[in-house]
Image (cartoon, rainbow, N blue to C red):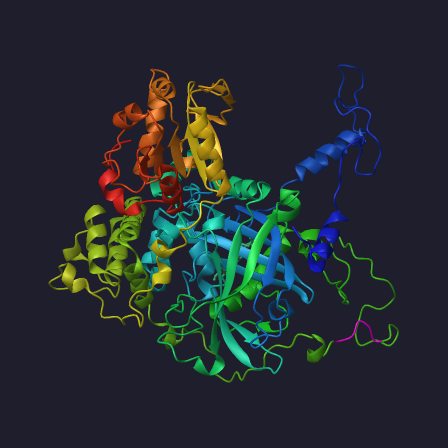
């Protein structure tokens, strides 16, 4: 990594706090060397411990206080350091230096998260993912606290505690963990029509990503850019992963949760350790101030996105993650984000969800991190020195010299002094606010289904099927029939076929369906459930379907090479080096962890045995060439494991490459595709089979063939 100056400053700042224990004696917190860390101080060998044992007391006391409250939402997460580079200046729109000086690199820390689960919950929950970025700019910290979904469930922060209470484990028995598939969540949703757009996203494949590295990031709200002249543009922030947007199947997600519940955390960590640095293109949708009311929705409404067909995303920067944290707690856990951490040139809007967030984030850090001095924790410190008159408080670190802690002052020569706008002083954007004090929702926010329709209409057939199945799964866990009915009633406003399909599976009689407004349609077949609501201005948007994502790389994809003794070393090594050249990660899987003896006397070291892992943990499989290897994989010991691998990978539409002389495995498996007809099933007699395999892995999955392969694995 080529370090620029700002990255160096952040690195040095963190380094000051690093401790290396190599060659060091154990000490107490006071620096006293400890000679015995095994036994407490006792009155006689078999006697009681002594209160005066300050070493034992210190150790136990510190241990007793190790835990801090987990985040009320987004408790489960993983983070990494990196850089943000602006490739095309945005000076026309914003005076923010990190966005306006072309080529400038800014150090960042990014934390990804799930929302509902506890800190120890599975990574593969069906959930929204947090995508929070702290930019350590020379003008102070700028935080973009976004998600992998561009809209939100609710329009006003007033409803946030209700939403979170509804999705979290139910209060009487604390069930279920990290899941929205339960009564209280769907009860709330059924009564909140504004949530339906986000529900479409949350039930789509976006909620079960293959990797944090393969998700989009969105600022969600509309923000304001202000340039040197004080001119305003509205802006939406986007991050598009260079590896494309990819997901797993729900069946895989549930199995990965059992096999490796740290799947996303491990994936991010290993990719960075292996030098496969995750990258995103940074893009903006810019709307001139005078166009604020040009849309058929309100820009302040966080349940709406701006279709890329209406305002294209201009790609202007690159986000790269290139360094794992040294200490999870010190960095990933203690990082404190806040949408109100701004720099000059960026301001918020009157979006009522964002306005409420501006209060919540500092407030939560006070109980989570325990002190108003949380900004002094190394990961939270800005790279420019903080100068102000705030003082004292728990765990104060800064030693501010002199007598003065007030302003104005003459004793301190008037310092620290106020900075003018032209000198980088932040000024809130002047805006005429002239209205009645009112506790109400704007009429311009009353359109709850049009963009839900846009999203559903934009999905490919397999994506629609996944979304339907997700709704069926979730609603089938709802025990109260009236809630299921109400949700189906909501779905009917989006798409009558979707509603009818879900209704059938969750035992809802559409003829008796209550409409959200409480009326029961007189002659209610699925046709009469059609919504009278507004139609979306854009009918379908390519950007909303993962079908149209990047599919030209196999970088960092994990490919399992299944093999046993007698494997064809030449074939394995040739394919391995071709795949590695493209950036893929190869892991050998065998009947046991014993080295595999190849046909030429060389050996391969298995990373896994057939029983220690499962196909759900891999992107693609190679059934390694070699008759003897194939026969051994089908012996009594290995057969169930080997076939389960192949059958599950097939069911999940992954690329499988049958090497030479492995026909027996092909024939014994559930693979029904005719040779050469299925782009994901490669056999050694395919034309240019190695290349065909690379192409199939890059395609991620053949979801369009999924319907035909729901055979038992
Ligand atoms: Fe929030 C954490 C994203 C609405 C209150 N939020 C949190 C995190 C992310 C988001 C990514 C985790 C940050 C981290 O990794 O530490 N939140 C969002 C988005 C929202 C949103 C994209 C809507 C567009 N949030 C929202 C509202 C409120 C909060 C309306 C309250 C009124 N969010 C919080 C919080 C959290 C938080 C309670 C918990 C831990 C934390 O802040 O530091 O303050």
Is residue 72 found left or right of 25 in the rendered image? Answer: left
Say whether residue 189 is magenta.
Answer: no
Q: Residue at x 12, y 64 (%)?
A: 522
**Measuring 31% from the left and 70% from the top, which residue is drawn there?**
538
Q: Is residue 647 left or right of residue 500?
A: right
- What is the x, y in percent for residue 628? 37, 18
Q: Nearer the viewer, residue 365 or 98?
A: 98
Vertical position of residue 87 compared to residue 614: above or below: below
Q: Does 690 appear above or below 161?
A: above
Q: Nearer the viewer, residue 437 or 179?
A: 179
For the C terminus, the image quarter is top left
Quarter location, residue 191:
bottom left
Vertical placement of residue 658 versus 329, above or below = above
**Is residue 50 or residue 60 the one in the foreground?**
60
Residue drawn at the location 53% of the way across and 47% of the way down: 77
Q: Main secondary structure of the magenta part?
A: loop
Instruction: Measuring from the top left, give residue 255's x and y in whole percent.
Output: 39, 35
What is the residue that sits farthest to the left in this orientation?
523
Q: Is 317 situated left or right of 669 in this image?
A: right
Q: Where's residue 409, x and y in %?
A: 83, 75
Circle count: 0
Membership of 416 in magenta stretch = yes
In the rendered image, the vertical position of residue 252 relative to residue 426, given as above or below: above
Visible in this render: residue 359?
yes
Q: Nearer the viewer, residue 606 or 122?
A: 606
Query: Which contiguous range is marked in magenta?
Result: 414-418
Residue 382 visible in this rendered orientation of the protein: no
């Amino acid at each position: 990594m080529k370090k620029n100056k700002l990255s160096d400053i952040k690195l040095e700042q963190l380094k000051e706090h690093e401790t290396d224990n190599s060659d060091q004696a154990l000490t107490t917190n006071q620096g006293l060397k400890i000679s015995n860390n095994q036994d407490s101080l006792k009155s006689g060998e078999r006697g009681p411990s002594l209160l005066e044992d300050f070493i034992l007391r210190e150790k136990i006391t510190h241990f007793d206080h190790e835990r801090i409250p987990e985040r009320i939402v987004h408790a489960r997460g993983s983070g990494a350091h990196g850089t943000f580079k602006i490739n095309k200046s945005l000076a026309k729109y914003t005076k923010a230096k990190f966005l306006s000086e072309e080529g400038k690199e800014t150090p960042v820390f990014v934390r990804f998260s799930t929302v509902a689960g506890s800190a120890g919950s599975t990574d593969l929950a069906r959930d929204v993912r947090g995508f929070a970025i702290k930019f350590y700019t020379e003008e102070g910290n700028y935080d973009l606290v976004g998600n992998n979904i561009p809209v939100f469930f609710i329009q006003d922060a007033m409803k946030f505690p209700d939403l979170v209470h509804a999705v979290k484990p139910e209060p009487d028995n604390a069930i279920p963990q990290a899941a929205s598939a339960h009564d209280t969540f769907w009860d709330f949703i059924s009564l909140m029509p504004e949530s339906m757009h986000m529900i479409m996203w949350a039930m789509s494949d976006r909620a079960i990503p293959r990797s944090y590295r393969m998700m989009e990031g969105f600022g969600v709200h509309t923000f304001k850019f202000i340039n040197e002249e004080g001119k305003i543009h509205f802006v939406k922030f986007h991050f598009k992963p260079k590896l494309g947007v990819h997901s797993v199947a729900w069946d895989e997600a549930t199995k990965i949760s059992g096999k490796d519940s740290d799947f996303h955390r491990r994936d991010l960590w290993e990719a960075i350790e292996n030098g496969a640095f995750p990258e995103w293109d940074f893009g903006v949708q810019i709307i001139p101030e005078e166009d604020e009311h040009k849309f058929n929705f309100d820009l302040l409404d966080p349940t709406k996105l701006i279709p890329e067909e209406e305002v294209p995303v201009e790609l202007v920067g690159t986000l790269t993650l290139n360094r794992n944290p040294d200490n999870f707690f010190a960095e990933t856990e203690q990082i404190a984000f806040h949408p109100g951490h701004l720099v000059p040139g960026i301001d918020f809007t009157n979006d009522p969800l964002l306005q409420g967030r501006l209060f919540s984030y500092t407030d939560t850090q006070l109980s989570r991190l325990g002190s108003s001095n949380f900004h002094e924790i190394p990961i939270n410190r800005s790279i420019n020195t903080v100068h102000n008159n705030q003082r004292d408080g728990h765990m104060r670190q800064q030693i501010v010299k002199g007598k003065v802690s007030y302003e104005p002052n003459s004793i301190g020569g008037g310092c620290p002094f106020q900075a003018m706008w032209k000198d980088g002083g932040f000024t809130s954007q002047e805006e005429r606010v002239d209205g009645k004090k009112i506790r109400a929702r704007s009429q311009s926010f009353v359109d709850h289904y049009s963009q839900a329709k846009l999203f559903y209409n934009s999905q490919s057939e397999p994506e629609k099927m996944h979304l339907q199945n997700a709704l069926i799964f979730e609603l089938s866990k709802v025990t109260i029939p009236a809630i299921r009915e109400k949700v189906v009633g909501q779905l009917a406003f989006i798409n009558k076929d979707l509603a009818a399909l879900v209704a059938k599976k969750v035992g809802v009689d559409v003829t008796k369906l209550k409409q959200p407004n409480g009326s029961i349609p007189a002659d209610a077949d699925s046709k009469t459930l059609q919504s009278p609501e507004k139609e979306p201005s854009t009918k379908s948007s390519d950007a909303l379907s993962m079908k149209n994502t990047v599919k030209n790389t196999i970088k960092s994809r994990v490919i399992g090479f299944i093999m046993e003794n007698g494997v064809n070393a030449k074939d394995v090594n040739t394919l391995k080096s071709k795949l590695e050249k493209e950036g893929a990660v190869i892991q050998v899987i065998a009947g046991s962890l014993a080295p595999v003896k190849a046909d030429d006397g060389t050996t391969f070291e298995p990373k896994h045995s057939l029983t220690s892992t499962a196909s759900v943990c891999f992107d693609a499989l190679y059934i390694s060439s070699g008759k003897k290897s194939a026969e051994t994989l089908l012996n009594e010991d290995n057969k169930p494991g080997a076939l389960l691998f192949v059958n599950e990978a097939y069911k999940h539409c992954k690329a499988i490459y049958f090497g030479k002389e492995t026909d027996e495995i092909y024939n014994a498996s559930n693979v029904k595709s005719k040779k050469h007809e299925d782009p994901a099933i490669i056999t050694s007699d395919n034309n240019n089979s190695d290349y065909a395999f690379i192409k199939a892995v890059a395609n991620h999955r053949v979801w369009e063939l999924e319907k035909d392969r729901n055979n038992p694995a």
